[in-house]
Image (spheres, helix red, strand yellow):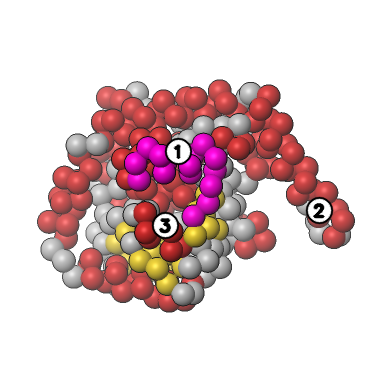
Amino acid sequence: MAKSSSFVDSFCHRSGMGRALRVPFAPFIQGKHMNDLIKQERNEGVLTLTFDRPDKLNALNNRMYTHLADLLLAADEDDQTGVIIVTGGASCFTSGNDLADFLQHPPTDLDSPAFRLMRVVIHLQKPLIAAVCGAAIGIGTTLLLHCDQVLVTRNAKLRMPFVNLGLCPEFGASLLLPRLLGHARAARLLLWGDSLDGAAAVACGLANELFDDGQQCLAAAQHMARRLLALPQESLRQTRQLLKQTTMPELQATIRQENLLFIKRLKSPEAQTALNAILNRSTDKKSLTGQPS
């Protein structure tokens, strides 16, 4: 029962995006430790995946990227799952990459965990809803470009500070953002790293609906998922495929180009200086407050 993996494999082979994905079917991967940093909740065909690392503002490390990709692939294969919700809970979506892990274990090729997750997401056959409360930094924002519906709170903060960090855009943002927002507005977000609050995200089309608080946002995501479940499922999946098929080849090529450049940029003096400065500030702050690193 590996049709999703095969579907992804064929695209990856043709586009040169990396080796084939080989993930065993396991609808719900159990266990504590690192897996506990992404909570799973199943409710009548709706799978909710929640980043649960509040002490790190839900920063994502390599093992979380791997686990999230595995969960999404398994859900895509699971006949009992119809819709997937991704969230960070009622306070923070994700602060982006865990910088300490990122610098210790940087992506070195197209099969690195974060890049593999990108391939999995763009080939999902089931609807993906994002419920964004609070900060959504870096990949926390670029992920939203691939969700079918994006719900945000007023205090949401969407930001892509790639240039500020000496890096480059990822997850197809350099292609999709200008098409969605126009060149000038996309440049403000990608070149300057300007942030958007929830209302601005809805106004420019990055998000669909705005909510006053996290609980309202999460409840609305569940309601939206149930509405999708009530629709003819095969028709829903085929329509999603039609929506994506015209841009898929270009998107794949763009993501590949971005990722190759990202690997190079990460080794650059500009990126190393910027990332280490942030990491050192964080370490100094913890030392002053007596918090463990």
Query: Is disc 3 placed on a helix, strand or loop?
Result: helix
Disc 2 versus disc 3: nearer the observer:
3
Whether the magenta-drawn stretch holds residue 185 is answered as yes
Q: Nearer the viewer, residue 153 or 67?
A: 153
Query: Which residue occupies the foreground of this view, 145 or 31?
Result: 145
Residue type indicated by callout 1: Ala
Residue 285's label in the rendered image is 2
In the image, which is nearer the foreground, mark 1 or mark 2? 1
| Residue 208 in sight | yes
Q: How many marks?
A: 3
> In the rendered image of this protein, does residue 174 appear above or below residue 231?
above
Distance Cα–Cα, label 2 vs label 3: 31 Å
- The image quadrant of residue 120 is top left
Amino acid found under the numbered disc labelled 3? Ala
Q: Tag on residue 201?
A: 3
Residue under the image location 30 percent in, 55 percent down? 148
Query: What are the residue bounds of the magenta stretch?
Result: 181-196
Please give left or right for residue 280 compared with residue 87 in the image: right
Dot 2 or dot 3: first in sequence order is 3
Residue 187 - label: 1
From the viewer's side, name the closer residue of 71 and 60: 60
In the picture provided, is 288 more to the left or to the right than 26? right
- The alpha-carbon separation of the residues under discs 3 and 1 comes to 15 Å
Instruction: Classify residue 130 by image quadrant.
Output: bottom left
Residues tagged 2 and 3 counted as in contact (Cβ below 8 A): no
Residue at the (33%, 62%) spot, across then down: 208
Dot placed on the residue nearer the N-terminal end, 3 or 1: 1
Q: Identify the secondary structure beneath mark 2.
A: helix
